[in-house]
Amino acid sequence: MATEENNTSIVVFSGDLDKAIASFIIANGAAAMGGKVTMFFTFWGLNILRKENYVSPNKKGFMEKMFGKMMPQGPNRLGISKMNFGGLGSRMMKKVMKDKNISTLPKLMEMAKEMDVKIVACTMSMDVLGIGEDELIDGIDYGGVAAYLGEAYDSKHNLFI
Amino acid sequence: MATEENNTSIVVFSGDLDKAIASFIIANGAAAMGGKVTMFFTFWGLNILRKENYVSPNKKGFMEKMFGKMMPQGPNRLGISKMNFGGLGSRMMKKVMKDKNISTLPKLMEMAKEMDVKIVACTMSMDVLGIGEDELIDGIDYGGVAAYLGEAYDSKHNLFI
Amino acid sequence: MATEENNTSIVVFSGDLDKAIASFIIANGAAAMGGKVTMFFTFWGLNILRKENYVSPNKKGFMEKMFGKMMPQGPNRLGISKMNFGGLGSRMMKKVMKDKNISTLPKLMEMAKEMDVKIVACTMSMDVLGIGEDELIDGIDYGGVAAYLGEAYDSKHNLFI
């Protein structure tokens, strides 16, 4: 069991900028400490993994088109969970982070990849929200709840964000 | 300690449909993998356990009546945490799940019972929100924070949703 | 490893009254059971630790002033995560808790201190939101993600709230 002593699993359910930032800061910190880290993106969290300005060539139903249009595409489009004011709060937070030289979300995501944080997109949520693999960034894994639970039971530190 | 290696405890604080679905998918998956699973419903999460269209015969104070009327009664009445639009988003999500043959929340709750997932309603939250035992579905347990912590410390995998 | 068997770490990301109450009830319960308990306050959770009616003498930028003015100062000013209605829901919940003799948030925070629950403010979030140490209550610790992860890996029970 020694190997699992500093593994981390995080379910990223939220698609809010502030919670996404918190998720990656914890994930990257845990990876820097040498443990295996798995992030499992489900429901609104999938929006963090969406490509910007990408329109899927796949034929979609009405509902899927609706969800697809209304949900933010990628890390630069996310709102914050409080005081967003139609995007103003989100822009303010990004400006402050830039001014203070704190890594932005796209940068945190790059760092996660470099540190071999495992990014898994929840296939069932993709089905519900009508998101295809072509709409998500490259270099990620796909899995369901069994894949998640395998990682969670192999981890010392599990969070749902 | 071998026995606890794949036990799960989940605090279900949220009463949003999407988070309730995520909670039960994780709980049922964990139960299918053979571990003991406990779900502790507190605050808004109690609404998931409310009977539909039930009016309690108990005398209630003004506050309790207010909370009772305004909070959703049971799994079919819940909204989603984002893009609910007065219930439209919730109906859309339920329709998509039905079309794609994904289990709905009431079905997931039935499956949880069949797999012996332990459902516990938080007695302190019931007191705060003025919810009596008669208003909640049958076959559940009741407990406070000590009961929850006992399960959490006996689990490998703990989440707050 | 015996020592860590009932330690708890909680990331308090949310600044909602209902979630803050849940955090402290779990933390105090865990401390009463004899484990080491660490609460790590980050993002909106920092508002729980703010002094009431305090105006910092430090020179702040425009963004920091904005965030500082709009975010609630301390446990008596927090809203609830659902049905807040501009503060009405929050007042209702506090009244009900008082009527039913349930400890209020300020009381729960006092109890946490008495039981040696470790309160840590996230320094990176303080930087982002422009909150100085002088604005937070006394007797707390300061740290970053590494400090948090150290506690989390030393705990059996980890939550993100």
Image (tube, coloured by chain):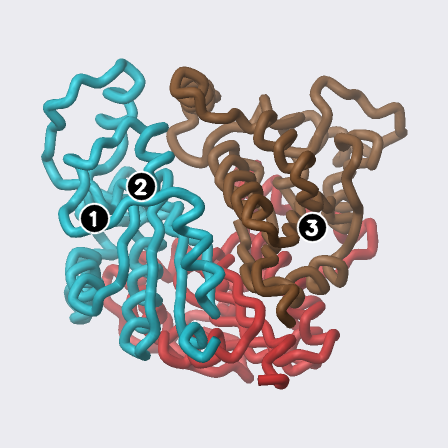
Chain colours: A red, B cyan, C brown
Whether residue A37 sits left or right of residue B1 in the image: it is right
Other-residue count near label 1 (Cα within 10 Å), few / some / many at <14 / 14–19 / ≥20: many
Q: Do discs 2 and 1 belong to a common subunit? A: yes
What is the number of the mark on residue A94? 3
Other-residue count near label 2 (Cα within 10 Å), few / some / many at <14 / 14–19 / ≥20: few
Residue on which disc 2 sits: B85
Q: Image point 54% across, 54% down: which residue? A: C160
Q: Is residue B88 visible?
A: no
Q: Position of residue B13 (x, y in %)?
A: 39, 46
Question: Which sits in the foreground, A84 or A39?
Answer: A39
Q: Do discs 3 and 1 belong to a common subunit? A: no
Q: Is residue B146 visible?
A: yes
Between the residue at mark 2 and the residue at mark 1, the CA separation in whole angstroms equals: 18 Å
- Which element type, helix, strand or loop, lies under badge 3? helix
Whether residue C60 sits left or right of residue A11 in the image: it is right
Q: Image point 82% across, 56% down: which residue? A: A101
Residue on which disc 1 sits: B75
Q: Earlier in the sequence, mark 2 or mark 1?
A: 1
Q: Is residue B160 above or below residue C103?
A: below
Between the residue at mark 2 and the residue at mark 3, the CA separation in whole angstroms equals: 27 Å
Tag 3: residue type? Lys
Say which of marks 3 and 1 sits in front: 1
| Chain at tag 1 | B
Q: Position of residue B120 (x, y in %)?
A: 30, 50
Q: Quadrant of the N terminus of chain C?
A: bottom right
What is the number of the mark on residue A24? none
Pointers 3 and 1 in contact (CB under 8 A)?
no
Quarter where residue A58 is shown: bottom left
